[in-house]
Amino acid sequence: MPLLIDSTSKDLSPWIEGIKKELNGSDRIFTWGELENPEEITTAIVWNHRPELFSRLPNVRLVCSLGAGVDHIMRDPLLPPDVLVSRVVSPYLSGPMSNFCLGAILYYQRKFDQYLIDKKNKEWHQEFNPERNFTIGIMGLGELGTDLAQKLLPLGFDVYGWSQSRKHVEGVTSYVADELELFLSSINVLVCLLPATPGTKGILSRPLFSKMNRGSYLINVARGHHQVNEDILEALKDGTLAGAFLDVFPEEPLPADSPMWEHPDVFITPHIAVVTKREAAIPQIVANHFRVIAGEEPENKVDRKKGY
């Protein structure tokens, strides 16, 4: 049962080499340009695939994401309704993501943003209280959010979580969907780790910011899909937000004429919070290929109704 791999944005050469090695000659893998008998393909491995892909794969049974995100798959109107979708879950994703978020949190908590300005101005401001007082809220207590919460607790932070269903993470106060205002009133640092679904599109916008404690700090490491840039800038202007640490944007790369580049209270990174490790992803993808062929469910299967 051959596999197909497709992406319009990734260099697939190292992925193909790794997958061939993992398959060990048991199956063949094709790219879009090599596809001669599309009806034979049962597994498609994708990241930002071609929009016409699924119209050419009449017998595809499993679609594997090359990363943790699956929004690039779920938004495809040609995705067959009965096809199984899987994503990559790995400590090689949760660990680096948590480390990145910890860096963003500590950067602001210890006022490194201010010290960069002081350095530029050659000013020496030695404060008696060099830490900002933080209570941290994590939107999305899945694999990534839970790992981050568990690493924040030993550092002495109070941590709150918000998700669609109640989570049980020791030491973390968990709020559910209809308790959003209570969640926001408890925190002054908001970390977005939500999945990209129709229900989370544009959630980081004026209606949500208006419910936050004034002067809160925003960190978005999930998807640009979640944020409205113009509303972030307005919230910074009127003091609703004190600052923002943004790794993702609705349009990437961030256009050179975006006012975000020049804003002194916006820290920008180029969507590098976490990068999928091939050595972790490839064995999962190949194992799921064989599970589905054998009539079994894939590991890390996406709930098609929830979108993650």
Image: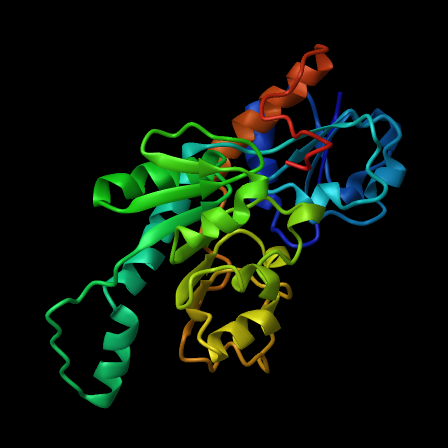
Q: In which quadrant of the rendered view does residue 27 lie?
A: top right
State the image coordinates of residue 1 (x, y, percent, origin top left). 76, 20
x then y, percent, for residue 221:
49, 54
Question: In the picture provided, is 165 more to the left or to the right than 159?
Answer: right
- Left or right: residue 215 versus residue 124 is right
Vertical relation: 284 (above or below) 186: above
129 or 214, which lies in front? 214
Depth check: 216 or 11 in front? 216
Looking at the image, residue 163 lies above or below residue 253: above
Count of numbered labels shown in the rendering: 0
Image quadrant assignment for residue 252: bottom right
Judged left or right of residue 40, residue 89 is left
**Considering only vertical position in the picture, is 183 above or below 262?**
above
* Left or right of 195, for residue 239: left
The residue located at (33%, 57%) in the rendering is 105
Nearest the viewer among 175 and 279 is 175
Q: Position of residue 152 (x, y in %)?
A: 30, 43
Q: Is residue 56 above or below residue 100?
A: above
Residues 39 and 120: in front is: 120
Instruction: Tell me which residue sits at (17%, 67%) in the image.
Output: 130
Q: Quadrant of the C terminus?
A: top right
* Whether residue 37 can be seen here: no
Is any atom of residue 22 visible in this view?
Answer: yes
Q: Where in the figure is residue 86, as x and y percent of width and height?
A: 64, 30
Point 65% across, 54% down: residue: 9
Q: How is the image coloured?
A: rainbow
